[in-house]
Amino acid sequence: MKKNSFIFTLLVSTYWLLAGSCSNDEGVKKPEPSNKKPETVIPPTPVFNQDSAYAFIKDQINFGPRVPGTPAHAKCAEYLSSKLKSYGWEVQIQNANITTFDKKKFTLKNVIGSYKPEITN
């Protein structure tokens, strides 16, 4: 009986050895792993127009001195915000209260324009 058991074990082992070496995907090329990063889509850069740039600066200067707390400061911040929005930019305005060295209090405005913020790199 020991001999039959040995032969049985030998046959089963041989079967598994042969079955494991057979494959029906011969000639099929397996895809190689890709190390490529997804392509980043960058929106086109607007064309710079020197005349428009000059006009925008002139508009800001026409408000007069833009000292925090003055009407010129508030009007300029509104102008910048509306101009950016008119070109499709997302705009945020940060307000900050400050005290100067001579104890005067002012509210500053920081105008932040983001072009297509949904696009990430």
Image (tube, rainbow, N blue to C red):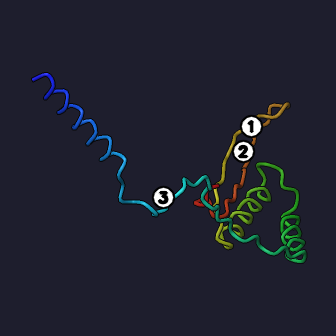
Q: What is the three-letter code of the residue carrying label 3? A: Lys
95 horizontally vs 46: left or right: left
**Residue 9 position within the rendered picture, expressed as x and y whole percent measured from the top left:** 21, 31
Figure quadrant of the N terminus? top left
Q: What is the three-letter code of the residue carrying label 2? A: Thr
Query: In which quarter of the view is residue 6 placed?
Result: top left
Image point (72%, 50%), residue name: 109
**Residue 92 position within the rendered picture, expressed as x and y whole percent measured from the top left:** 64, 55
Q: How many marks?
A: 3
Spatial CA distance of label 2 from label 1 is: 6 Å
**Residue 37 position within the rendered picture, expressed as x and y whole percent measured from the top left:** 62, 55
Image point (26%, 35%), residue name: 13
Element at badge 3?
Answer: loop
Return the residue nearer the eye: 105 or 111. 111
**Circle 2/circle 1 CB separation < 8 Å:** yes
Spatial CA distance of label 1 from label 3 is: 65 Å
Return the residue nearer the eye: 34 or 68. 34
Which comes before the other along the chain, label 2 or label 1? 1
Image point (28%, 39%), residue name: 14
Looking at the rendered structure, which numbered label has been put on residue 30? 3
Q: Badge 3 local density, few (<14 within 10 Å), some, or many (20+)?
A: few
Element at badge 1?
Answer: strand
**Residue 118 position within the rendered picture, expressed as x and y whole percent measured from the top left:** 58, 60
- Residue under label 2: 107
Q: What is the three-letter code of the residue carrying label 1? A: Ile
Q: Is residue 92 above or below residue 87?
A: above
Return the residue nearer the eye: 19 or 94. 19
Find the residue positioned furthest to the left.
1
Spatial CA distance of label 2 from label 3 is: 64 Å
